[in-house]
Amino acid sequence: MERVCFRLQVKLEFLDEYVDRHKTVWPEMLDALRDTGWGNYSLYLDRKDGTLIGYLETPSLAAAKAGMEKTAINAKWQAEMGKFFVALEGRRPDEGFLELEEVFHLD
């Protein structure tokens, strides 16, 4: 099982809307995430500077991302969420996150 941590930067002017959107994630999106291997998935936001940290566990991040790529709901979600982030340079949020290196884990 891969443990994955990633970082994105939410634009400060969209912090409240970003949080609100995640209070009511579409059921189809939740199902797609579960069905494609995005387990134990959490997002953490620092409201002071917009740093967003994501964490998930998956058998394969590459397979999980590829599975989501095949779903229509992911394309719709990513299109709507792109406006919230800094420095994606034309990429969708699920393509533009910076994967962080794990340097310690206490089992």
Image (cartoon, rainbow, N blue to C red):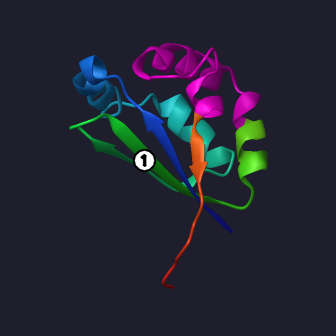
63 in relation to 87, above or below: below
Q: Main secondary structure of the magenta part?
A: helix
Give percent across and percent down for residue 8. 47, 36
The residue located at (21%, 38%) in the rendering is 48
Identify residue for label 1: 53
Task: Give the side of residue 106 with respect to residue 14, left or right.
Answer: right
Residue 56 vs residue 70, the one in the foreground: 56
85 falls in the magenta region: yes
The residue located at (27%, 23%) in the rendering is 12
The residue located at (57%, 66%) in the rendering is 102
Give percent across and percent down for residue 25. 41, 31
Residue 23 vs residue 83, the one in the foreground: 83
Which kind of residue does numbered mark 1 sit on? Ile
Residue 78 vs residue 31, the one in the foreground: 78
Give percent across and percent down for residue 78. 56, 21
Give percent across and percent down for residue 104. 52, 76
The residue located at (72%, 61%) in the rendering is 59
24 falls in the magenta region: no
In this rendering, the count of numbered labels is: 1
86 in relation to 103, above or below: above
* Snapshot quadrant of residue 76: top right
